[in-house]
Image (cartoon, rainbow, N blue to C red):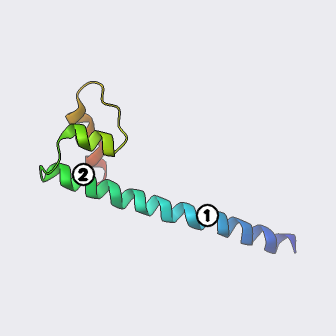
Amino acid sequence: MNRILLIALSTSLLSPMSVHADERIYDTKNICGRYYAAEINAGVAARLLDLKDSGRVSSRVEQYCNFFR
């Protein structure tokens, strides 16, 4: 009985996390696509991606976006 409860609990906890991760990946790809299409500049992309605005923002955004290509 304890195993069934444990399996049900772990399944219910893991499902919302994967949905949130999928949404975050989709949002990130959308932001990076807009950045590379020159619809938004590096500062706006960094803010939308929750990156810090210190230093060379454009290179930081490009490194982050290259991971998702």
Q: Residues within 10 Å of mark 2 (few under 14, many from 20)?
A: many
Q: Nearer the viewer, residue 54 or 68?
A: 54
Q: Identify the image quadrant of the N terminus.
A: bottom right
**Residue designated by label 1:** 14
Which residue: 24% across, 32% down? Answer: 57
Under mark 1, the amino acid is: Leu
Give the structural element (helix, strand or loop) at label 2: helix
Residue 3 in which image quadrant: bottom right
Say if residue 69 shows up in the picture: no
Say if residue 56 shows up in the picture: yes
Give the CA separation, mark 2 to mark 1: 27 Å
- Is residue 24 shown left or right of residue 41? right
Q: Identify the image quadrant of the C terminus.
A: bottom left
**Residue designated by label 2:** 32
- Give x and y (percent) for residue 18: 52, 63
Give the structural element (helix, strand or loop) at label 1: helix
Q: Using the image, determine if residue 32 lies above or below residue 58.
A: below
Residue 51 in which image quadrant: top left
